[in-house]
Image: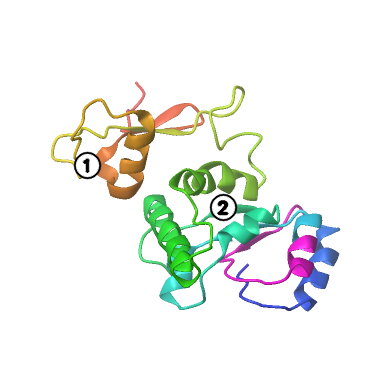
Amino acid sequence: MGMCFEDNHVFICIYIALRKYSAPLNFVTFCHISGFSIFFPLNLILCSATFCCDYSCKLCSGMLDARRVLNHKVKLGLGTDVAGGYSPSMLDAVRRTLDTSKALTIQDPQYQTLTFEEVFRLATLGGSQALSLDEHTGNFQVGKDFDALRVNTAIAGGPIDLINHGEGPKVLLEKFLNLGDDRNIAEVYVAGKRVVPFVETT
């Protein structure tokens, strides 16, 4: 459900009522919302939000202050919104979220810009928490489904330059998030099953 309201308490009352009869609600294309009085009931009624930065920027809906949302303990994940955005890629969503956070820092130098680690979390565990799937997926905690990408940052002809071959995992992750594309994705696993490259069973 799209939401681009500021200082509007009416919809909060509606969702408090709906929450009695439904699973936790997720606000999609969550853009901007102000006031502790708004954030508090969102957290209290176990609502979550999905920020589709691509869509929000394209339609000039606004720039989400993700830091503020997280500080108010509202569950937040990233979405690609392929219907209104430019790309279905979660890498694109990560980059545009980082850009939005940096744009907010340009407006206010005191603003605490999101780190790439924080945005990576929003794209993985944050998304599963927003959809109430974090008991099953979102990270590599023992007992959860094995949903993963095997990334090869050194693929021949790929977009990533490895200047120092002794670079650690953190640097390689940052390079992948900033520069990587589907050429770097060697394998995809869903619930422990390899789905890319696809192998037919005999």
At which x and y percent is residue 101? 47, 61
The amino acid type found where label 1 is placed reads Ile
- Quadrant of the rendered image containing residue 74: bottom right
Residue 45 seen in render: no
At which x and y percent is residue 77? 56, 52
- Whether residue 37 appears in magenta in the rendering, the answer is yes
Q: Quadrant of the C terminus?
A: top left
The image's mark for residue 160 is: 1
At which x and y percent is residue 44? 81, 56
**Residue pictured at 59% horizontal, 44% vertical:** 128
Which region of the structure is painted magenta?
23-41
Report the mark closest to the observer, 2 or 1: 1
Tell me how far mark 2 sits from mark 1, CA to CA.
Answer: 26 Å
- Quadrant of the rendered image containing residue 40: bottom right
Residue 160 versus residue 189 in the image, above or below:
below
> Which element carries disc 1, helix, strand or loop?
loop
**Residue pictured at 66% horizontal, 34% vertical:** 135
Residue 191 versus residue 22 in the image, above or below:
above
Apparent side of residue 194 relative to residue 79 in the rendered image (left or right): left
**Residue pictured at 20% horizontal, 35% vertical:** 162
Residue 37 versus residue 113 in the image, above or below:
below
Apparent side of residue 124 relative to residue 94 in the rendered image (left or right): right
Lower position in the chain sequence, tag 2 or tag 1: 2
Q: What residue is disc 2 on?
A: 77
Outermost residue on the left side: it is 157
- Quadrant of the rendered image containing residue 21: bottom right
